Amino acid sequence: MLLATSNLHKVGEMRELLPGVELEPLPDGYESPVEDGDSFEANALIKARAAHAKLGGAVLADDSGIEAYDLGGAPGIHSARYAGAAASDEDNLDKLLREVDAVGGDRRAAYVCVLALVEVDGTERVFEATCEGRLLPERRGTGGFGYDPIFVPDETGPDDDRTMSELTQAEKNAISHRGRAARLLAVHLADG
């Protein structure tokens, strides 16, 4: 199955989440489509449909991000480029912290992941999952990427104040938005 990304970190993570499923990244030189959808689902489908149309076969695409409740769901679908098209993870995280600090509130947030599957025959399936939590005012931990250093998931329990960056990869996979969506996909693949 083709995974509609050239991000090798994401390919590795998805391979770990979907053992037994052979996932290959997009070939070198593939020109990704413009992600101009208005939701995670729309953007995941744009990527999956485009790769299926150009390359054929079964294609899996992911669109994910973080939604801060006090910011009306921002950065949402703009999570990867929140501070601008060329922004780094650090730039995006800094902008989110500045904006959440400016409005105060309870710092509630959720990671969202949508996996879109276009099967060989063109049948489309969508799998969506979330991971609820809260945002810390400062970074902690060295694992993970993106907004992980400030996100404390609810799922680890009220007495566990570790960020996603402080969890082991196995702990993160068990509760993350992407891990949950991948398990929904795995059930579908097993039933198919």
Image (tube, rainbow, N blue to C red):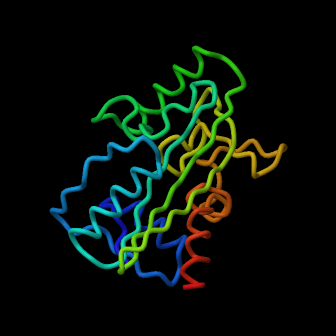
- Apparent side of residue 132 relative to residue 72 in the rendered image (left or right): right
Q: Looking at the image, which is closer to me, 143 or 152?
A: 152
**Quadrant showing the C terminus:** bottom right
Which residue is painted at 69% across and 41% down in the image?
133
Q: Residue furthest top?
A: 102
Residue 73, by quadrant, is: top right
Q: Residue 131's x, y, as percent?
A: 65, 49
x then y, percent, for residue 2: 34, 73
Estimate the x, y position of residue 93 in percent, counting from the top left.
48, 32
- Tally of marks: 0
Q: Could you say which is closer to the camera, residue 161 or residue 133?
A: 133
Residue 114 versus residue 120: which sits nearer the camera? 120
Residue drawn where x is 29% and y is 70% of the image: 52
Q: Quadrant of the N terminus?
A: bottom left
Q: Residue at x 59, y 44 (%)?
A: 141
Figure quadrant of residue 3: bottom left
Q: Is residue 190 above or below residue 11?
A: below
Q: Quadrant of residue 129?
A: bottom right
Residue displayed at 33% across by 61% down: 5
Which is more toward the observer, 124 or 64? 124
Residue at the extreme right of the image, as rendered? 159
Horizontally, is 146 left or right of 133 in the view?
left
Q: Residue 137 at what x, y percent from top left?
A: 62, 26
